[in-house]
Image (tube, coloured by chain):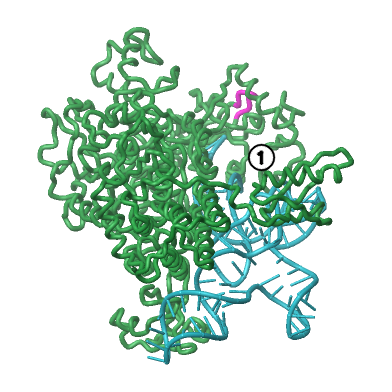
Chain colours: A green, B cyan
Amino acid sequence: MEYNFREIEQKWQARWAAEHTFKAVEDASRPKYYVLDMFPYPSGAGLHVGHPLGYIASDIFSRYKRLQGFNVLHPMGYDAFGLPAEQYAIQTGQHPEVTTDKNVARYRQQLDRIGFSYDWERSFRTCDPDYFKWTQWAFLQMFGSWYDPEQNKARPITELIARFESTGYADVTPERWKAASEREKSDILMNYRIAYQGETSVNWCPELGTVLANDEVKDGLSVRGGFPVEQKKMTQWQLRVSAYAERLLDGLDRLDWTESLKEMQRNWIGKSYGTEVVFTVETGDKKTDVTIFTTRVDTIFGVTFMVLAPESELTQQLTTPGQEAAVAEYLAYVAKKTERERMAETKTVTGVFSGSYGINPLTGQKVPVWISEYVLAGYGTGAIMAVPAHDSRDYAFARKFDLPIVPIIEGCDVSEQSFDAKEGRMCNSGFLNGMDVKEAIPAAMDYVEAHGLGHRKTNYRLRDAIFSRQRYWGEPFPIYYKNGIPTPLPQEALPLTLPEIDQYKPTADGQPPLARAKDWTYDGWPLETSTMPGFAGSSAYYLRYMDPRNDRALVSPEANAYWRSVDLYIGGTEHATGHLIYSRFWNKFLYDLGYVCEDEPFRKLINQGMIQGRSNFVYRIVGTNTFVSAGLKEQYQTQEIHVDISLVRNDRLDLEGFRAWRPEFAQAEFVLENGEYICGWAVEKMSKSMYNVVNPDDICDSYGADTLRLYEMFLGPLEQSKPWDTKGIDGVHRFLRKFWRLFYDGDRFLVTDEEASAEDLKTLHKLIGKEQSDIENFSFNTTVSAFMIAVNDLTDRKVSKRAVLEPMVILLSPFAPHIAEELWQALGHTDSVAYAAFPVYHPEYTVENNCTYPVSFNGKMRFTVDLPKTLTPAQVQEQVLASEQTARYTDGKTVVKVIVVPGKIVNIVLK
RNA sequence: GCCCGAGUGGCGGAAUGGUAGACGCGCUGGACUCAAAAUCCUGUGUCCUUAAAAGACGUGCCGGUUCGAUCCCGGCCUCGGGCACCA
């Protein structure tokens, strides 16, 4: 029998499906392990070889854990609401669901070919009404909750209402509450709800006709589509994520995530300790208290002006009649800038004087109040005290508008630039004089608090999440407007499904597409017309897999108590500040209300690297139809053109294929080197437009899924980005065939029941040990190498013993499951290899048989020690110490470390 | 600007204080073959020299710790990623 991977892979994929081999069932008698991939958005382009990288890694880990006796939950689904399907619908008029169905079917087909051990019976899409019912349910829970700062968790809003009624809370007295109208009550509660409606400055993308979250905008352009984004004031649904800032930050310490990812989240949350100080501002005769936020209150003696954000409400109030025109002009200038322009021009300093003067509460000194876009309305109080000597932004501003610069740290030179470092000795600073900056900061804080001028304050950069999208293809809000007051739908009305509409674009007057629906009402009242954003459906999906068909709860308490949280989550870094923040927030919220039992959703997280494409180029001599080989291109003036990599093998161009590729190349002429056309190449993103996409289906066709899986792992460390290069794939394919040939010589089955020799056991147990530690460390590339070494070894020695091969089949099964199943069956087993047990590792077998151990001492002296064979390295160390101690260590100083390079050299080190 | 991470043969990469370059690709030579494919064997860091052996150098650069450094520490250079008027 030859290794016929096509037949084998089809056969076993069919059997796994028919026998429900990977169905996960709660089983209290076994330890659970939950392995999850970040589910994909099924795009029209299908999967390329980069997508399954993480899926293969998680599949290997799942299968490994299963062999270790764990009850593994390993599900997969689709993040199916989203912009591309909707954009396509707008262009073609086709319902996004149709596109989505088609894409999901294709994804499923592609995934199935790779032989994943998913429990597909738990699968769902975020656009399934049975699923988004629970997304809407969660929204209603958030709408019906507030964040109680005393208990430091979300509580039902009814508790807050009760407090308003009885004792009052914050600025709401019982009298005020009782006197309030329905609308006023609604407005008051909106200030507290976790899901609330409020006016805010949003990232508006005119091209897409919708708002975007901060993490959906990069460099002032939309992440999807790359369209310009501008700032716009709008009333939007929002989630009070900021209330969870401290807990989101705190929780990171307990997570097994990479430091860099945690760091990204810490930066995004952006905690900073500082002080809020009140400055009295005089506008003519009028006095206004303006609170500013600073982390460097120690520099307050160096304040020479103040700055307000243009969007701050104070700008109008603090503008004097004389400056009105200038300020209005400046505000108009700022307003018409897009986010992108604003970012592109961060070096340009702009601003306008308001006409008012603030009084420094510590010095009594009067300083001018300016308005500038470098101060952000959304952070702190939207107003700052400017210390140009010690802040580079204030410095640039002061230089531009010729404002005074007063240094307050001894010996610093501010003639060219500001001195931002938190070090040095204070001067020109009253009571702070002579202190070190590090002492001065708390001293100044204490002073400000003691004199009632302000108080310590912790600020976070993390903003509330904008939760509305002016779009069709998303979850409708379970909200209707009764007398204009947002009112939740009763839970029985869920799921609220999308209405049919004739067109998917916004209405002529700028309403979201849902406004086109004929009868978009509830109980006679209009329903909300915006829909939820992409992250709504992906925020709690991992909980749903625990109990996917439950129609009474998102997840039953029993299923949740068993599966708890995701033990291993694998996905890309691009979700670091989006999905992974929202999901943690969402989970903590559900935890507060007692719906889930763990406060963090993803215990361990691995970011797989991106697989980039390897593009090929041809070089056309400018103005001709002649193409010159890469080695000779310097001799001509050429134009670089992407060529489809399917026309290239090992950088050599298939000339006929190239002529047939495009009509304009049909008559192409070539300048060859050594009779061949050599293409240029570059590593780029894998994408259609660069003709460098490699489809996993093609690899499965020519090499098989097992080879694809092994090769993707062999390519390099999982977490590293690397280009796809098909060159090396023959090597791993050869390895599988070699392994096969240990079982079969043509049709002859070679496996014998001979006893394993010491050498055989060494080969086997080295591999077991290596695989075990490598998998735990996600170092899959070295495991594949270890396999190759073992198989080469057995091939060299012509070993085909069941005692060695049977465990090796189990070891191989997480990586190359199809061939493993086939060989497992050939060895006489009727059950799937997935039910086998991982072989037990005996390190003592791996010790060299050689009885003589060379020892080097202090790197200079060498001698040998005779020791019995089959000692563990630890035992060897002991023996060496015991035999040499008295001779060597007469100074009484003890040995700190003994290093054994297994089997070769034993080295004793003195410290 | 700030914060992470990484620099090792022709290439992907191994080795985290102990024989640097495992394993694979590519390349060299050979066996089998009418031929090709497939398969197998051989060599393969650089330099010098040689019939061979041996030797010197070698993990971005400079310095330090150590008997010993790709690995630890300090400084620099380069590349990649993230954040970016966040006061």
- The residue drawn where x is 31% and y is 51% is A830
Q: Which percent across, then down, holds residue B13?
A: 55, 60
Residue at 35% x, 64% y is A704
Residue ranking furthest to the front: A754
The amino acid sitting under disc 1 is: Ala
Q: Secondary structure at mark 1?
A: helix
Residue at x 44% of width, y 57% of height: A753
Q: Is residue A363 magenta?
A: yes
Q: Position of residue B12 (x, y in %)?
A: 53, 64
Extreme residue toward the right, this view = A891
Which chain's residue wears label 1? Answer: A
Q: Is A542 situated above or below A868?
A: above
- Name the magenta segment's main secondary structure: loop
Assign the N terminus of chain A to one quadrant of the image.
Answer: bottom left
Pointer 1 local density, CA inside 10 Å: few below 14, some 14–19, many at least 20: many
- Does residue A462 belong to the magenta stretch? no
- Measured as percent of width and height from the top left, residue A596 is found at 36, 28
In this rendering, does residue A729 appear at all? Answer: no
* Residues shaded magenta: A360-366
Front-lying residue, A869 or A313? A869
The one nearer the camera, A237 or A770, is: A770
Tell me if residue A223 can be seen.
yes
Disc 1 target residue: A389
Compared to A169, does A839 lie above or below?
below
In which quadrant of the rendered view does residue A725 lie?
Answer: bottom left
Question: Would residue A378 appear left or right of A862 to someone viewing this image?
Answer: left
| Left or right: where A143 falls relative to A604 | left
- Residue A277 horizontal side relative to residue A534, left or right: right
